[in-house]
Image: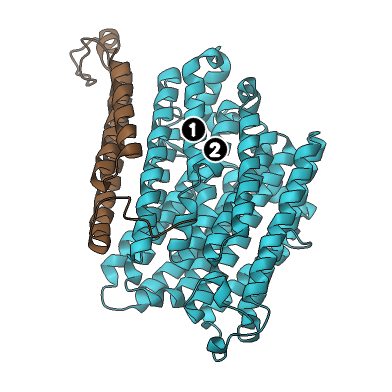
Chain colours: A cyan, B brown
């Protein structure tokens, strides 16, 4: 029996099952939600053994039917998404007591998870769009979950910008279909390789549409305005989910699949697409970091920091070398866990102190040692202090830049890293150190499940470097890099041959 | 010619989303954009004097392949209409909630967030 479809079926089923069974009891949604995400996490670990595998939906072979493809990259992303989601649902048990309807919360959260797992697994470009929409529509709803004025405003802004980008992605898919007559990623890649299609202006228009659409979804700098509003407005676990996972699963991952596996990075360099990606990445890195320096709202600062780190990922993936891809993938993982940890920390601070303004906090370490610990681990990791997760990924990105003979960019990346350290130190000084304010002299540490989730996530951040130990690397990272770097193997895997 | 008109429709929608100051008009703009794309998808599979892609036992296979329109874009359009419906429903419900909080649909007055 093949287990791949369960990754989508379980969260989708549970999402609709929860509202049916738990009208009265408030504990049932907690239990079901956590059980579901924990099962999915275990399943994603089990699936490593089955890589590579292809599942044909309804038994239809490609290019006619929809395929679900489990290769190195999908398995890598599945583990990341399901691990972080499990810890986030664990955190939500206490945190979501602040809001009224847990039932709808878990329902929407699991829908978003189903969408993300679907995007990661699918091998069909239109199916990718459908799963993408499932994920982002639940994200729009969750952004406005508190239904306060600011939250609704942010949600509407996110919805309008998000739907415009979705429309452009769909237009791109329509162009690709009209040129090749196929929707299967591997089949399209084969058809594009055969003829002189790369002379067609329509194809380049489609590429630009994808670049804009997925650039918007991953909040790269000229397309970023929704992110600093949407991410802080959502409840803290959802901020962690949006900033840690959604911008990667719905933004960078489809871009990687389409640009590397479908078009092929070599073909794209005819018209300077890698250079465009590189410049966009550079603008986001510097712009995000500079804007983060002046923020006083703690969650808004983290949101700008996300933009800056997405820039790193774009810079690394534009290189197209194995080391660059490795850096990008590792940075996706390390940024996802570190940023989720930081957002959960900010949620814990908000839960206890009822404010998000860093100028009003101070000396919190004294009263909330565990929150302070996880906050420090998260910020040290993102600032790139060894031996935490962020250090290794930044090291690989900078090494890849040096090896590709782009010394200027390497120095630039180091410089932005210093800026990152700067704004996190500023946050740290305001929030955790210094003299404690009299109003907070009696505050207590946050509830147990929240702390548990934060400590587990901190441990992941601390020991993430172990992914680079050769036996572990051979199982997880190397197949992911390989499948992106050699597009022919992906085509062979899906179409058989 | 049809494609140019279709593109024009898309631009009308984009114009409404970018320049209008009223939430409802922005939502209408979004809807127009979605319909433009749906129309475009249908036009990809369209064939002049084509027949519906349903094959009956009396038809000749070669004749059928020559005349029938492409059914796949039609399936895509149905899916994309459903997605568009979901987005519109959510957008309208958020707009109603915004009206309850702010008492206005004007986006110049809805700006509590900044930075």
- Position of A18 with respect to A237 (left or right) is left
Between B51 and A402, the residue placed more toward the observer is: A402
Q: In this rendering, does residue A41 appear at all?
A: no
Residue A255: assigned label? 2
Asked whether residue A193 appears in the rendered view, the answer is yes
Residue at 42 percent across and 50 percent down: it is A115
Q: Residues within 10 Å of mark 1 (few under 14, many from 20)?
A: many
Position in image of residue A443 (x %, y %): 54, 88
Q: In what element is the residue under mark 1?
A: helix
Q: Residues within 10 Å of mark 2 (few under 14, many from 20)?
A: many
Task: Judge whether A177 appears above or below A299 on screen.
Answer: above
Coordinates of residue A429 in the picture (x, y in percent): 68, 73
Q: Are marks 2 and 1 in contact (CB under 8 Å)?
A: yes
**Side of A153 where B103 appears, left or right:** left
Labels 2 and 1 positioned on one and the same chain: yes
Q: Which residue sits at x=55%, y=66%?
A: A298
Residue A424 lies left or right of residue A131; in this view the side is right
Can you identify the residue that label 1 sits on? Answer: A210
Q: Most extreme residue toward the bottom, as rendered?
A: A442
> In the image shown, does A458 or B14 lie closer to the viewer?
B14
Q: Secondary structure at mark 2?
A: helix
Chain of the residue under the numbered disc 2 shown in the image:
A
Q: Which residue is depicted at the point 74% across and 58% down? A: A384
């Amino acid at each position: 029996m093949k287990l791949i479809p369960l990754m989508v079926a379980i969260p989708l089923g549970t999402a609709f099952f929860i509202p049916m069974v738990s009208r009265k009891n408030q504990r049932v949604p907690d239990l079901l939600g956590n059980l579901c995400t924990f099962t999915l996490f275990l399943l994603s670990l089990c699936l490593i053994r089955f890589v590579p595998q292809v599942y044909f939906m309804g038994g239809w072979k490609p290019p006619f039917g929809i395929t679900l493809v489990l290769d190195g990259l999908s398995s890598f992303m599945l583990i990341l998404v399901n691990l972080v989601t499990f810890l986030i649902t664990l955190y939500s048990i206490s945190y979501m007591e602040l809001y009224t309807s847990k039932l709808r919360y878990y329902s929407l959260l699991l829908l978003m998870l189903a969408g993300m797992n679907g995007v990661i697994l699918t091998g069909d470009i239109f199916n990718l769009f459908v799963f993408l929409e499932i994920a982002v529509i639940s994200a729009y709803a969750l952004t406005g979950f508190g239904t306060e004025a600011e939250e609704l405003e942010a949600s509407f802004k996110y919805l309008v910008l998000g739907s415009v980008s979705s429309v452009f992605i769909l237009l791109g898919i329509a162009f690709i279909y009209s040129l090749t007559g196929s929707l299967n990623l591997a089949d399209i890649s084969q058809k594009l390789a055969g003829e002189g299609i790369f002379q067609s202006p329509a194809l380049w228009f489609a590429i630009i549409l994808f670049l804009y659409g997925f650039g918007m979804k991953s909040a790269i700098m000229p397309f970023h305005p929704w992110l600093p509003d949407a991410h802080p407005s959502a409840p803290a676990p959802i901020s962690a989910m949006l900033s840690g996972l959604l911008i990667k699963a719905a933004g960078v991952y489809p871009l990687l699949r389409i640009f590397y596996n479908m078009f092929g990075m070599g073909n794209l360099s005819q018209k300077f697409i890698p250079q465009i990606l590189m410049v966009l990445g550079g603008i986001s890195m510097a712009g995000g970091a500079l804007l983060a320096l002046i923020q006083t709202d703690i969650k808004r600062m983290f949101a700008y920091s996300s933009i800056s780190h997405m820039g790193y990922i774009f810079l690394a993936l534009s290189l197209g070398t194995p080391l660059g891809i490795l850096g990008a993938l590792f940075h996706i993982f390390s940024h996802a866990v570190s940023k989720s940890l930081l957002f959960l920390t900010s949620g814990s601070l908000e839960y206890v102190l009822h404010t998000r303004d860093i100028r009003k906090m101070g000396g919190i370490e004294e009263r909330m040692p565990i929150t302070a610990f996880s906050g420090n681990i998260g910020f040290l990791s993102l600032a790139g202090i060894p031996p935490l997760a962020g250090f290794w990924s930044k090291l690989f990105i900078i090494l890849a830049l040096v090896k590709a003979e782009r010394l200027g960019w390497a120095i630039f990346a180091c410089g932005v890293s210093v800026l990152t350290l700067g704004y996190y130190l500023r946050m740290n000084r305001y929030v955790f150190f210094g003299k404690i304010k009299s109003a907070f002299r009696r505050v207590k540490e946050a509830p147990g499940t929240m702390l548990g989730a934060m400590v587990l996530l901190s441990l992941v951040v601390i020991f993430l470097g172990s992914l680079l130990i050769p036996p572990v690397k051979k199982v997880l990272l190397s197949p992911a890099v390989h499948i992106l770097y050699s597009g022919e193997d992906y085509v062979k895997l899906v179409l058989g041959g | 010619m049809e494609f140019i008109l279709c593109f024009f429709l898309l631009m009308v929608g984009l114009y409404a989303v970018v320049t209008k100051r009223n939430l409802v008009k922005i939502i209408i703009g979004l809807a127009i954009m979605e319909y433009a794309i749906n129309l475009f998808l249908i036009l990809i599979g369209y064939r002049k004097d084509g027949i519906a892609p349903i094959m009956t036992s009396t038809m000749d296979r070669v004749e059928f392949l020559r005349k029938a329109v492409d059914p796949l874009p039609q399936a895509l359009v149905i899916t994309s209409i459903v997605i568009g419906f979901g987005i519109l429903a959510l957008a309208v419900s958020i707009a109603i909630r915004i009206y309850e909080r702010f008492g206005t649909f004007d986006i110049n007055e809805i700006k509590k967030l900044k930075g």
